[in-house]
Amino acid sequence: FARNLHDLLMAAPAGLRATMGLDPGLRTGVKVAVVDATGKLVATDTIYPHTGQAAKAAMTVAALCEKHNVELVAIGNGTASRETERFYLDVQKQFPKVTAQKVIVSEAGASVYSASELAAQEFPDLDVSLRGAVSIARRLQDPLAELVKIDPKSIGVGQYQHDVSQTQLARKLDAVVEDCVNAVGVDLNTASVPLLTRVAGLTRMMAQNIVAWRDENGQFQNRQQLLKVSRLGPKAFEQCAGFLRINHGDNPLDASTVHPEAYPVVERILAATQQALKDLMGNSSELRNLKASDFTDEKF
């Protein structure tokens, strides 16, 4: 079960691309949600391609794709998934401008997320049925960031998962989620509260305070700004800083796995090699020639 969950969470993200989520249904219609490259919801609709309104539904999908420059279409793998996939292929034939690539996405746990308190906080004015389509679209963009919002047991991690000790299963699955989040690292400027809560050293309260600080002051420019966040002290900073990434910030090292404590070591390496940081980062051949013992001190 743990291995299955690990594989689901570590699935390759599609990245920052505008995505349309289609939550298939026959009688109840196909729920449509479009999210922009950052995962922000920009449009929703419900179409009925399987109940004699295919032409109207095709026009709706084509219009949304064109308006929001949709690059990917995530189709849930539940009831009427194949029919919805065929419908989307027909849309592409009718409207050559619709070039977004389709991907079938597991919708396990999407309904659980739709009805959760978290989804209600995130989309208070959105109908429950449409929240599932948002989850499907975001899952394709970044599976890890989206799936951490759902109780791991609801994701469907394998046959007979209900026949084993639920306490042990929950403990093991929670540990897997935390391992995955910390192995990948978290973008400090885009991460949600549930994702930040899974980072080593951060409590739910600290995660909420980080998001509140970000909303109030704008993006973090360096890791040291974390110390300005309410209730986040030096000890918590020491534990979490290495797992939080800041892309395009003041210091390129803030986007790496290097912990702030080790920055002086990097500076000593730069002084010895007389190279710029951007040239040395990722340059394995240059780094391989260095002797670790030349740069160690009492701390490292």
Image: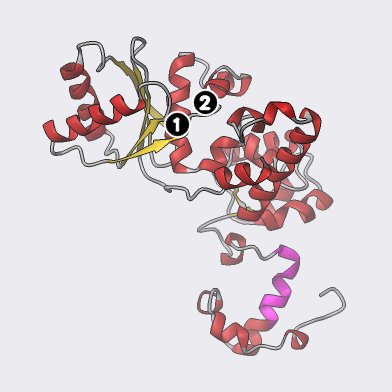
Q: CA distance from mark 2 to mark 1?
A: 7 Å
Q: Is residue 50 left or right of residue 74?
A: left
- Provide residue 91's location: percent of width, then percent of height: 18, 30
Q: Quadrant of the C terminus?
A: bottom right
- Amino acid type, callout 1: Ile
- Amino acid type, callout 2: Ala
Mark 2 closeness class: few <14, some 14–19, many ≥20 residues within 10 Å: many
Q: Is residue 158 at least partly visible in the picture?
A: yes
Instruction: Using the image, tell me which numbered label, if any, was put on residue 144.
Output: none
Q: Residue at x 71, y 88 (%)?
A: 291
Nearer-the-camera pick, 96 or 206: 96
Image height of 164 relative to 245, above or below = above
Element under label 2?
Answer: helix
Q: Residue at x 66, y 40 (%)?
A: 1
Image height of 141 relative to 67, above or below = below
Magenta range: 259-268
Q: Is residue 218 at least partly visible in the picture?
A: no
Q: Residue at x 42, y 47 (%)?
A: 14
What residue sits right under mark 1 in the picture?
136
Q: Is residue 139 left or right of residue 267?
A: left
Image height of 118 relative to 216, above or below = above
Nearer-the-camera pick, 50 or 139: 50
Q: Residue at x 49, y 43 (%)?
A: 142
Mark 1 closeness class: few <14, some 14–19, many ≥20 residues within 10 Å: many
- Provide residue 278's location: percent of width, then percent of height: 51, 74
Element under label 1?
Answer: helix
Q: Is residue 237 left or right of residue 184?
A: right
Which secondary structure type mostly characterizes the magenta part of the structure? helix
- Provide residue 262's location: percent of width, then percent of height: 73, 70
Image height of 262 relative to 280, above or below = above
The picture quadrant where one finds residue 266 is bottom right
Instruction: Using the image, tell me which numbered label, if any, was put on residue 110.
Output: 2
